[in-house]
Image (cartoon, rainbow, N blue to C red):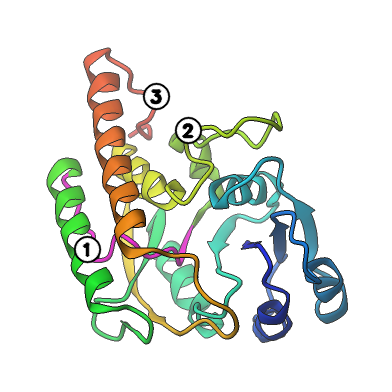
Amino acid sequence: MIPALNEARNLAQVLPSLPPVHEVIVVDGYSPDDTHRTVRRVLPTARLICQTRYGKGNALVCGFAAATGDVIVMFDADGSADPTEIPRFVAALRDGADFAKGSRTRPGGGSDDLTRLRDLGNRGLTFLTNLLFRTRYSDLCYGYNAFWADVLPHLRLPEPDPPGTAVWGDGFEIETVLNCRVAAARLAVREVPSHERRRIHGVSNLHAVRDGVRVLRTILAEWRWRRSAAGQGDRSYQLAG
């Protein structure tokens, strides 16, 4: 499942490199570039859909809703994710995990793109999340993940419809929301060593300080939501058994 915004040049190289899978879903974020024609040209079998609102979070949930397979793999369009690692994530799920989380810090992982400032911020945010949610994440701010499609109802992610005003989780915060709610739902998590590559073309929209503060606010908001739900006796976010 690939969210894309103005990634035509990258998709031209990323899509042909994917291994055979049940389906490839590209979610376009109203790209003014050649994204649509590029997808149709290089991978005609891909399902191309448009997101209903704006932001990476909305693109992801639109893709999740459209998926028909048993396993969903979140895959970036910029070339930073290595498609040869997909079998590792699927193997972790088949081995008993509900959620396979990519980690650049596990032995065998790494990054060609992580700056010292971003690495320091990631370590601090990972520590805080582990403290508040009693998790053992080693790399919070990494979006290469896979999970069984049937766990989605337990995560209470925003609905793709209706179109219009943005809702909580529509933006960049979605990956942190997802990790926090995986923890709240007490899913079985398996970390998978992953090596992050540099994006092929273009410049990343990430901003270390701005986005770091956004992730921090998301962690605290999700922690407060979890405490409130627990205090009200709401167990619906937990998996049975």
Majority secondary structure of the magenta segment? Answer: loop
Image quarter of residue 141: bottom left
| Residue 29 within the magenta-colored segment of the rendering | no
Residue 29, percent from left and from top: 69, 55
Q: Whole-Å distance between the Cαs marked 3 and 1?
A: 32 Å
Q: How many residues crowd around disc 2 within 10 Å: few (fewer than 14), some, or many (20 or more)?
A: some
Mark 2: amino acid: Arg
The percent position of residue 154, horizontal first and vertical second, equals 45, 35
Q: Contact, CB < 8 Å: mark 3 with mark 1? A: no
Taking 240 as reference, is 206 above or below it? below
- The numbered disc on residue 121 is 1
* Residue to which mark 2 is pinned: 156
Taking the spot 65% from the left edge, 81% from the top edge, the residue there is: 14
Image position, residue 122 (x, y; %): 24, 64
User: Quarter of the image containing the N terminus?
Assistant: bottom right
**Quarter of the picture holding the C terminus:** top left
Q: Secondary structure at mark 3?
A: loop
Q: Identify residue type, mark 1.
A: Gly
Q: What is the span of residues highlighted in magenta in the rendered image?
A: 134-146
Query: Marks 3 and 2: in contact by CB < 8 Å?
Result: no
CA distance separating discs 2 and 1: 27 Å
Q: Report if residue 186 is visible in the image.
A: no
Locate residue 21: give its quadrant: bottom right
